[in-house]
Amino acid sequence: MKLYDYILSPSCYKVRLMAALTGVTLELRAVDFHPGLEHRGPELLALNPAGSIPILEDGDLLLTESSAMLVHLAAEAAPGWLAGDAPREAARVQQWLSFSGRLTASLGGARLHEMLLRPGDIGALQAQGIAALRELELGLIEQAERGQRFLAADRPTVADIACFPYVALAPDGGVPLDPYPAIRLWSRRLRSLPGFIEMPGIHRLHDLKPEPQHEASEG
């Protein structure tokens, strides 16, 4: 599989992370996203007229939406990351995959504004991002009440990987994660998974400050 990739893109990172967690080897084709705007050039527009990355090629299969890429990687290599035959679990996975687009638009938009000076109403983007984080926090609390530690099940699924990067990088857009203890603990669980990989701004578990109130229970 070939991934058209930009090292600082959270959407590209989630595909690299999914591949690492499921043992899939990707051929990475670096894209000069900034400042070169290569994703808007003729070669990549021929693959994705929307002018966005990532783009994943697997033989004659061409995918241009990161959530579809996560599902494809899991289906190919590790079906346990999908919902299986549990209808409620499948519905939760689909719910959070759709929700991840709101994280991209809000927290991702704020990050692009702050880091790459992308035009936008930074106050509105941050407010939308905070609303999304509150919804995610509540979802994780409700899952904990069901005895489940991840967004759709008591194990990580593609839903967690779809949501994680833009949440972890929210501070880059001026949105702190301090008010969201359930999100911070969920993030630590994901960072502790075997095969977890980093990107600039997202560190491994041992580089994070401990959560004093929950250190013993989380191990």
Image: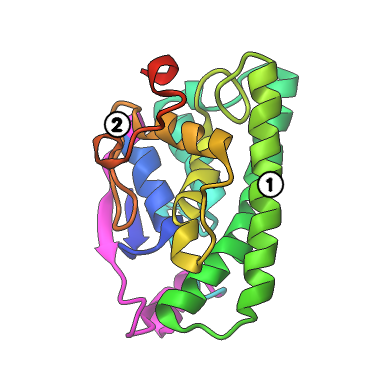
User: Residue drawn at (27%, 63%), measured in percent from left and top?
Assistant: 29
Q: Which residue is mark 1?
A: 134
Tell me where residue 60 appears, x and y as whole percent.
44, 52
Provide the residue span drawn in magenta.
Answer: 21-49
Q: Is residue 108 visible?
A: yes
Classify mark 2: residues with Cα within 10 Å, few (<14), some (14-19) or many (20+). some
Name the residue at 51% across, 66% down: 174
Give the image quarter of residue 42.
bottom left
Instruction: Provide residue 138's location: percent of width, then percent of height.
Output: 70, 36
Instruction: Point out which mark residue 23 bears.
Output: 2
Question: What residue appears at the point 50 percent right and 27 percent down from the top-left corner?
Answer: 156
Could you tell me which secondary element the residue under label 2 belongs to? loop
Residue 119 position, x and y percent, is 56, 86
Which residue lies at the image location 30% right of the left edge and 62% below the top edge? 7
- Magenta run includes residue 34: yes
- Give the quarter of the image for residue 104: bottom right
Observer-nearest of 81 and 110: 110
Question: Foreground: 35 or 201?
Answer: 201
Colour setting: rainbow
Q: Which mark is residue 44?
A: none
Q: Amino acid at mark 1?
A: Arg
Sequence order check: which comes first, mark 2 or mark 1? 2
Quadrant where the image shows the C terminus: top left
Residue 208 painted magenta? no
Above-or-below relation of 48 to 12: below
Distance from the alpha carbon under mark 2 to that under mark 1: 33 Å
Closer-to-camera residue (128/196): 128
- Where, by quadrant of the figure, is residue 5 drawn? bottom left
Q: Nearer the viewer, mark 2 or mark 1?
A: 1
Give the residue type that dot 2 points to: Gly
Instruction: Name the secondary structure under disc 1.
Output: helix
